[in-house]
Structures are given as structure tokens and as C-alpha cells.
Amino acid sequence: MDGLSTTTACNSDIQAEATENYEIWSFQDDSGNELYTISKSKEYSKNFTVGPIPITVTASATGNLGIRGDVTLDTTNTVAIVVGPYLELTGYAEGGVGAFGISAGIGIELLILEIDLPFTANLQVLPSYPLAIFTETPLIIKTMDGKVYVYAKTWWDKYTYTIVKWDGYKWEFALIDPVFMYWAEPNQFINISSSGTGSITTLDIAISSLDYNWQNGYDAFSALWAGDFNFDAGTYAFEAEADDYLEVTMDTDSDDSYDTTLFGLNDSKVIDHAGDNDGTLKNGPTWLTGDALSNAGTPGSISFDGNNDYVKVAHSDDFEISNTITVEAWINADSLEDYVATVSFLQDNSNTESGYGLRYNDGKMCFFLTTNDMGSNDWNDNPGASINTGEWVHIAGTYDGSTIRFYKNGVQTEYEDQTGDIDWSPSPTDLCIGMHKDDNTEWPFDGKVDEVRIWNTVRTQTDIADNMNTQLTGNEAGLVAYYRFDSPDAGVTFDMDIAEDDTLGLSVDYENVSGNADISLSWSKLNSFTVSYYNSTDLSGDAVWTTTEDKIDHDWGGLAVLTMKTLSPLIAFQHAGKGLLNLTKLPAAKTTVLSSPVMTARWNSMWMAT
């Protein structure tokens, strides 16, 4: 087995370090022969003469079946185990001339077929955490490796010289996806990564935040960080940036309410935050750093030029919903014409209609939906609403098996009585965002789209109105697909409430397409205050004590007066001439302004002025 290459990561670069392997155990003997193999050979030889010249032709085939592998240890405390069954069939043919035990000739050696199923496991023990394991099980098939050589035989030995050698065909299939397992100290990430320019396994990074700029210019590589972190109850602000693909997920064994994809960034991919149906950008839609949600922390939406660009999401049975459905989106149209769609999973070819979508028709945006009780073109009567160009508007369509409804900005505009299951004959090809596209027509949308949500439940008007301005976590009941269009250029911020003290798992999946790699991830608890008390009014000397509080709600012994003194970015309160109590808002995003320099001792009532 080849030795592992290890790297050490820091904020500036990654440099490869050489490793030395020590063999612990091998399936081969000292001569390199496999110990646990059954081998069968068959040889055919024919001697004849051409005139006075004796000629010998030999052909042989050998089959091997067994288990092979080895166990090694390198200088990074990594134990590498490779073991698995294999089947091999080889053959050779030779033709030569000679007499009296001495001959010379030419031969060909060929690998007819080799099948390997090696189980690979890398285990590393480090001081920062007990154990980390990477495993994979590929199926490897090879054939037609070979060489042509000349040889000379004597009574005592055989000598060969290779004239030409070639590699045949090789196929490798991942029977089981690579698995990363670790047992780490809380509040640390561990790092395992691989590169298109060779294997990079870095297990000796144990950190509480990620902030790297790799300058090596790899052609492509991916990285996965994972760790368990102790979170106190409260609201946390997460921030992430990346130049290519980045996805951050949260997971916990104790409460699946936090199992969600926190972020998804990709300059060529649209992340599905509710499932596995990611989308691909087609013909160059434009990422935007502004979004439709006025109170959302995550910037980002996507713009379509109305020519031929759209987002393609491959067909999934998840989208073929029976009779309870809600489809939502924020849209901002630059222009409108009949049949353009913001969301479409449909087929509409003359009398052949199926599926659903949010589509413009006859002067209004409608909920296109067909059922098996509807006749041809009955969808023309589906409810909708007129919309203006140049402004963000929220649109939604629902169907509960008896009524189709349309909502504009959280208010129902029209409804239509209808029955039957949603018609899926014929089944649409793909889900498209930014275009009505079926198997023979395309009607591209000209404008911006954000916050596309598909549910297999019926959202009420209250549900829609209460949540249309709020970014979802992705694990809401009934949410089938959720596209937030977080801009990879702007990065991501995301607030998350954690109801009680808990240990949550965070995983960061990164993929670098080319060039240097940039990634950062951090989080902080909101509404926290650093509180320091000083004996001196000029803040000289060390603080008497310092603590961090979630909120300011103390009653300081019934003392009546505190005097405010502004020391930007600190806010200092002088307590009856006995020193200063200084509070720093974390993160320092606001400036506190009080209407009076005098306030009562119970602070929580006055802090509402911030």
C-alpha cells in the first residue's frame, strides 16, 4: 500500500509533509508471495523444428483467488488497514529457439481480469482526541495490462528484458460511500480532506472555528470538518463565507429538531435545505447579494435574464405529490408574458397536461395544477392574481383535494373548487426554477426569484402569512424542498435559537473547484454582555470582576441611582460615585442611546431603549 500524505493547515497555507510507513503485518511472505491465496495454473508447450532450428512455443494461464492486504503505521500515528478478497486471471505466451538447455525468444504477458474488493480503514490517534477513522470499500476491476519482452534461458536461470509495457482498462466503483467517524473532545473540529492532485489526509487539526486561505492552488479538492459543540441555551449568530461549494449541517442525537442544513453556498449549485434535491445552474443565472426577506439574516437571491437560463433540479419522486400541496416563492419580475414560470414541475403539450407550477397566464400569475378529474385546458380557470413588475411579491398556491387556492403577499386572492389526485401522466422531466420547461417547450422567466418552498401539506393563510418573511430551518414538517438561494459571493449569516443546553454536532462540507481555497465559519451568542466593574471612574487598573450575562436584569441592592457615562464602544454606568460598571454589547452591532443620564437600579426596564 502507498504511504499516506499528510498536511498541516494554518491560516496561510497547507504544505505537504513526507511520512514514513512501518509495516505491522502483511498478507505476503518475504518473497512477496500471497499467503492466503488458492492458485491454479495450466500450461501448454509444443516443440517442433523448422529445418535444422528447434522451436518451442509455450502458453500458460493462471487463476488466483484469495485475500490480500497489509497493516502499516506511519509517523503521524495513522494505522492504515487494507484487506479484502480478490480474483485474478493472468496468462503468457512465449516462442523461442534453442538447444542443449539454452534458449532465447520473445514473450507476451497479459492480465486477463482482476477483481478487487479492498476494505480500507485509516485510524489515527492524537492527543487532541482519542480516535478518528476514515473507511471506504471500492470495487476495482482491471483488464488488459500487459507487456512484451525478450528472454534468455540457461540451465540455472531465466533472464528477461521488457520491450514495451502498457496499462489496460481500470474501473472503480464506490460500493459504500466513504465514511468519516471520529471520537473527539467537545468544542473542536477535526479535519479530513482529499485532493484531486493526490491524497491529503489531515487529522491533526483540532479547532473551534474555521478560517483558512489555502494558497497552494490545487486543481480540486474537498474537505469535511466535523465536531461536537456544547451550546448553552440562547440565540446564536452563525457566519460563513466560501469561494466555491460550502454546506454546514447541524445534527444531534438527543433532539432532531436541530437536524438541519444551516448554510448552503455554491457558485454552480443551488442547495436544497430540506432534502437531497439540489439544483444546478443552467446557462448562467446571476447570483445576487440582496434577498426578498426584509428581516432575514441570509443575503442572496437569483436573477434570470429571460433568455434561456434557469435552475434544473433532477426529477425526484419527492415532487410527485398526491393531493395535498403548497408551492411558494418570492418573485420580482422585470417583464412578464404568458406561460413563463417561476417554478414548474409540469407537462403542457396541447392536450397533454400534468403536474404543477407557478406560471403566468392571461394577465395574472396562476397556480398551474392538473388533476385526474380535470379536462384538457381546465387549468386555464385555476386561481391567480395580477402582479406588478419591478417589486418583490410573495406568491403561493395550495391544493387540498377539493379546492385550489392562490395567495398574494399572504392574502388569498382567488380559489377554484376542484377534485382528484394531481395528474402525473406523463411524468414531468425535471423541476425547473426560472422557466416553464417540459419535453418540447421553454418559457423563461425574466426577473428575480427567492425562497422557493414545496410542501406535501396544505399551508393555511395564517401559515403562509406568518412565515413568508421568515427564513426556515429546513426541517419543518411537510417541507419537501427548500431553495434559499444564498449567494456564495456574499456569504451567509444565520440566527438559530437553541432552547436548552445541548451538545450539537456540526459538519462542514467544502469543495474547491480550482485555484486557491477560502473558507471561514464562526458563531457567537447573541444578546450577551460583557460586564466589568471598576473601582475607578477613569477605568484605570484591572476590573474588580468581569462576567458575561445574557441580559441585564439585576437589582443592585435597591440602590436608587446609576449615572451613565459614554465610553464608545463601551457603555459605562457610574454607581453612586463608587466606580464604573461597564457593559459591552456582543456582537457590537448597536449603539445604545438612553434618553436620560439617570436610570433606576433595575436595568431591564430601561434597556428597552436600545
Image: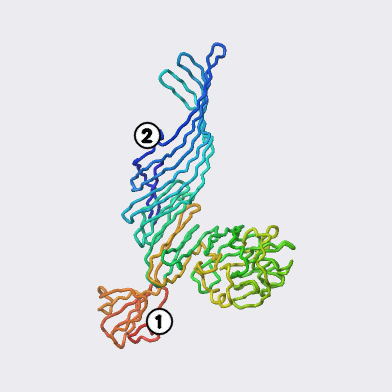
Which one is nearer the viewer's eye here, 474 or 238? 474
Give the quarter of the image for residue 332.
bottom right
Q: Tell me residue 556's x, y (percent).
A: 30, 83
| Three-letter amino acid code of the residue under disc 2 | Asp
| Three-letter amino acid code of the residue under disc 1 | Val
Q: Tell me residue 316's x, y (percent).
A: 59, 59
Mark seen at residue 29? 2
Q: Is residue 44 above or below residue 452?
A: above
Q: Secondary structure at mark 1?
A: loop
Disc 1 from disc 2: Cα separation: 80 Å
Q: Are marks 1 and 2 in contact (CB under 8 Å)?
A: no
Residue tagged by mark 1? 593
Residue depicted at x 50% and y 48%:
175
In the picture provided, is 98 more to the left or to the right than 501?
right
Residue depicted at x 39% and y 43%:
3
Q: Secondary structure at mark 2?
A: loop
Which one is nearer the viewer's eye here, 277 or 604? 277
Instruction: Please rate how many residues cluster around mark 2, counting C-alpha atoms within 10 Å: few if below 14, some from 14 to 19, many from 20.
Output: few
* Quadrant of the drawing holding the N terminus: top left
Residue depicted at x 25% and y 74%:
541
Q: Tell me residue 477's x, y (percent).
A: 52, 69
In the picture provided, is 393 more to the left or to the right than 31?
right
Q: Residue placed farthest to the bottom in the image?
A: 560
Give the quarter of the image for residue 441.
bottom right
In the picture provided, is 186 more to the left or to the right than 366?
left
Instruction: Please rate how many residues cluster around mark 1, counting C-alpha atoms within 10 Å: few if below 14, some from 14 to 19, many from 20.
Output: few
Q: Is residue 81 above or below residue 559?
A: above
Give the quarter of the image for residue 577.
bottom left
